[in-house]
Amino acid sequence: MARVAGKIAKKTKRRGAAIAGAKPRKAAPRGVPTRPPRAVALRAPRVLAGLEKLYPEADCALAHGSALELLIATILSAQSTDANVNRVTPGLFARYPDAKALSGASPADMERVIHSTGFFRQKTKSVLGACRRIVEAYGGKVPDTMEDLLTLPGVARKTDNVIMGKWFEKNEGVVVDTHVGRLAHRLGLTWTSRNEKDAVRIEADLMQVIPRESWTFFGHAMISHGRQVCTAKRPDCERCLLARDCPSAFTFPHNKRAARAGRKPAPARRQG
Ligand code: SF4
């Protein structure tokens, strides 16, 4: 275990990654500053303050009673809804109550149980691979460091951030899922990433402008806002209390009319 962690640490240092234990950070595109532009540094605390007012109780919506259950639920949540995952996991954990039982599950049976969450073959491989390593290297317990979590096959950094932040209450990074990626771009909180899917650069940027103690909360709150207000297809800028600090407010075809009708908030009346 220590040898594997050591190898990762060495590799990370050698390649100059900005996030400990993460895949090496891609260099910012030519001409793009690696430090936050002033406008972003000023905007980020206002957005965070707005999210704290809007979602003071923001939390992980995946039902779980242990680090292992949270790990499996997070793997299953990729390209699925939390509600859907929450319908599947009670049956899964009743059938396979611990890492040893999960690691020995028949792939066909697991695929059947988790089928409704989508991408069930790949997810089965990830669950089985992660549980085997947890049993073989960590005595059946989910490890509590980022370096060790990153050695679990098929488990991405996003999942590791969820486990570290939610279960172990350690702020090691910011969860960047589809909602956080989209909102980071719309709210102008990333300056080195090329698009919403560039999770490594988005996370590195967010870690520079959001205080470490808020990383876990920030991820959950951004996800809540992305689900409830700033949806992918129809962001509701008229109802959005972050609009005064959002460079994308009222720039979408469906709400440009509202802006023309004078419903765009005046920049002077900032919230937070
Ligand atoms: S103002 Fe509009 S684009 Fe900006 S965060 Fe709110 S809903 Fe999203």
Image (cartoon, rainbow, N blue to C red):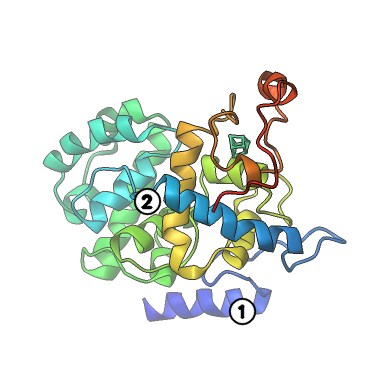
Hey, what amino acid is under mark 2?
Pro
Q: Quadrant of ligand 1?
A: top right
| Sequence-first disc among 1 and 2 | 1
The image quarter containing residue 242 is top right
Residue 149 x, y percent position in the rendering: 39, 64
Can residue 213 be seen at all in this image of the molecule?
A: yes
Kind of residue indicated by mark 1: Lys
Compared with 27, 83 (above or below) is above
- Residue 48 or 73: which is nearer the viewer? 48
Labels 1 and 2 touching (C-beta < 8 A): no
Tell me: residue 100, above or below residue 15.
Answer: above
- Residue 107 lies, in percent from the top left, at 29, 38
Can residue 156 be spotted in the picture? no
Marker disc for residue 13: 1
**Residue 9 percent coordinates (x, y):** 52, 78
Q: In the picture, residue 169 is in which quadrant?
A: bottom left
Select label 1 or label 2 by which is in front. Answer: 2
Q: In the image, which disc is placed on residue 56?
A: 2
What is the CA distance from the residue labelled 1 to the residue labelled 2?
A: 37 Å
Label 2 SS: loop
Q: Dot 1, how many residues are within 10 Å of its Cα: few (below 14), some (14-19), or many (20+)?
A: some
Q: Quadrant of the N terminus?
A: bottom left
> How many numbered discs?
2
- Where is residue 22 drawn, in percent x and y? 54, 65
Q: Residue at x 42, y 68 (%)?
A: 146
Q: Secondary structure at mark 1?
A: helix
Q: Is residue 230 left or right of residue 75?
A: right
Residue lying at 52% horizontally and 55% vertically, measured from the top left: 48
Q: Residue furthest right?
A: 31
Left or right of 71? Residue 248 is right
Residue found at x 63% / y 54%:
202
- On screen, residue 144 versus residue 248, left or right, reads left
